[in-house]
């Protein structure tokens, strides 16, 4: 089983003599970068591909990234079935039911540290969704139950921080393994979409110095945008020329805002709309960069010319290609491999890390850690105001929440918990080191 990507899938109902009409089952006539699953004989997998196609009937269409993830999960499932000599449509005995066997296989991978709890949950979720489709849409019957369902009540916090509860249908095979509560006990990471590690002030200085040594303007400015605005890599590198048209009033101390998200041509997680706050000096640096001969030459090399020139990406590589293509880019279908920020990640690994090591700095980080660094920097600036009574902690948390575009205050509170845990850790460590140094000095 393998997966291929069609640059563009046209959706229609074929007629005789090569004619076609709109397919009334879908409210779109095409889908960009559509995954197709093909078996070892080169034949498309019927039910797997029908399931993927059914996803396009939903009112809210999955992104190409999401659909690709589901396709990969189904591909892995079918490869496991073949290797384990299991027929995914039939089971001769109850103990050979494919869903339970596959859940056991994933559990083993998890226990051996091969996959995370979230990966296990996602993979089994994709398989459950596939089998629900077979049962409900293809009317396929199975001799033995594929899972046991139950209703459970869960408690959660809404985006305003209030406790809520609701009943949900669960399956026994979808239950995620119990893991340690990272929000409470982990002083190394913050859970914000992924495990993020804020950089210390010294680490930030070292990274900026290394970037200036390398003198790659697209990387330097991109990193600074993330550190000073909290933007994700998808937002930083899908910023357009139109976002830097505002005049700068240097007598003002206010940051310059740039709206990103749905309808702005700049991607955000979940298409959430919010504002990036640019320091005046950084906004000015980007305006100067845009007018530089180097930037102009890169735009001249760009193959994709937008109807509105101001919709061109700010950051292009030497071939005039963006580092990250927006999910709504009309030229998305023209890319064999859609730029997704991987060039930036390779820059960190192959270029920036080498310079840091040359400078005797051992700093392991990802681009996404820059976002956490912004959040922690912002919180650390506000906490003295909380201590002095000028603002309360609730205001500080909501301020950080809005600046980072968090949907839930719970995520923002993790930054405060992280800060408190590290303060305690530092005090304990300093106390021990003082005790140890006195002991050594007394012995000497």
Image (cartoon, helix red, strand yellow):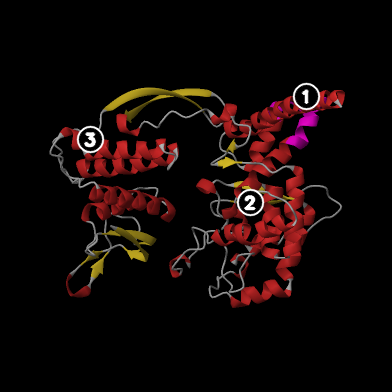
> Which one is earlier in the sequence, the residue at label 2 or at label 3?
3
Find residue 414 and report its horizontal and vertical position in percent.
61, 32
> Which one is earlier in the sequence, the residue at label 1 or at label 2?
2
Q: Nearer the viewer, mark 1 or mark 3?
A: 1
Residue at image coords 71%, 32%: 396
Figure check: 100 above or below 70: above
- Secondary structure type for disc 1: helix
Figure check: 327 above or below 418: below
Asked whether the viewer can see residue 247, the reply is no
Residue assigned mark 3: 146
- Secondary structure type for disc 2: strand
Query: How busy is the neighbourhood of tag 2: few (under 14 within 10 Å), some, or many (20 plus)?
Result: some
Residue at image coords 31%, 37%: 103
Q: Is residue 197 left or right of residue 327?
A: right
> Marks 1/3: CA distance?
57 Å
Residue at image coords 77%, 56%: 209
Magenta highlight range: 380-395
| Nearer to the camera, 425 or 366 | 425
Residue 259 got which mark?
2
> Marks 2/3: CA distance?
47 Å
Residue assigned mark 1: 431
Q: Is residue 306 magenta?
A: no
| Nearer to the camera, 437 or 182 | 437
């Amino acid at each position: 089983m393998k997966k291929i990507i069609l640059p563009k899938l046209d959706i229609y109902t074929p007629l005789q003599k090569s004619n076609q009409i709109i397919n009334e089952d879908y409210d779109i006539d095409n889908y960009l970068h559509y995954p197709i699953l093909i078996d070892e004989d080169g034949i498309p997998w019927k039910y797997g591909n029908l399931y993927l196609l059914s996803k396009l009937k939903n009112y809210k269409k999955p992104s190409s990234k999401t659909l690709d993830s589901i396709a990969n999960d189904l591909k892995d499932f079918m490869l496991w079935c073949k290797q384990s000599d299991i027929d995914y449509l039939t089971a001769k005995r109850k103990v050979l039911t494919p869903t339970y066997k596959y859940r056991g296989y994933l559990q083993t991978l998890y226990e051996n540290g091969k996959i995370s709890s979230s990966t296990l949950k996602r993979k089994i979720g994709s398989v459950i969704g596939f089998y629900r489709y077979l049962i409900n849409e293809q009317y396929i019957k199975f001799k033995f139950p594929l899972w046991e369902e139950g209703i459970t009540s869960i408690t959660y916090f809404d985006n305003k921080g209030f406790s809520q509860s609701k009943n949900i249908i669960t399956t026994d095979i979808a239950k995620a393994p119990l893991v340690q509560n990272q929000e409470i006990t982990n002083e190394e990471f913050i859970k914000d979409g992924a495990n993020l590690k804020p950089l210390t002030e010294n680490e930030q200085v070292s990274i900026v110095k290394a970037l200036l040594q390398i003198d790659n303007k697209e990387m330097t400015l991109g990193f600074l945008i993330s550190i000073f605005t909290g933007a994700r890599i998808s937002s930083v590198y899908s910023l357009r020329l139109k976002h830097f048209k505002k005049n700068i009033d240097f007598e003002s101390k206010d940051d310059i805002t740039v709206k990103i998200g749905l309808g702005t041509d700049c991607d955000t997680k979940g298409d959430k709309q919010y504002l990036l706050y640019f320091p005046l000096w950084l906004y000015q640096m980007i305006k100067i960069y845009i007018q530089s001969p180097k930037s102009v030459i890169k735009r001249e090399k760009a193959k994709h010319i937008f109807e509105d020139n101001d919709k061109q990406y700010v950051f292009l590589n030497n071939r005039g290609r963006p580092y990250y293509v927006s999910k709504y880019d009309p030229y998305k279908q023209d890319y064999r491999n859609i730029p997704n920020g991987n060039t930036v990640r390779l820059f960190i690994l192959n270029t920036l890390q080498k310079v840091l090591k040359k400078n005797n700095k051992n700093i392991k980080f990802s681009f996404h850690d820059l976002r956490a660094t912004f959040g922690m920097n912002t919180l650390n600036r506000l906490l003295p105001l909380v201590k002095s009574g000028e603002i309360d902690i609730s205001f500080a948390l909501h301020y950080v929440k809005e600046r980072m575009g968090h949907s839930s205050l719970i995520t923002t509170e993790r930054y405060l918990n992280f800060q408190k845990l590290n303060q305690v850790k530092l005090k304990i460590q300093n106390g021990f080191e003082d005790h140890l140094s006195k002991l050594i000095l007394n012995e000497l």
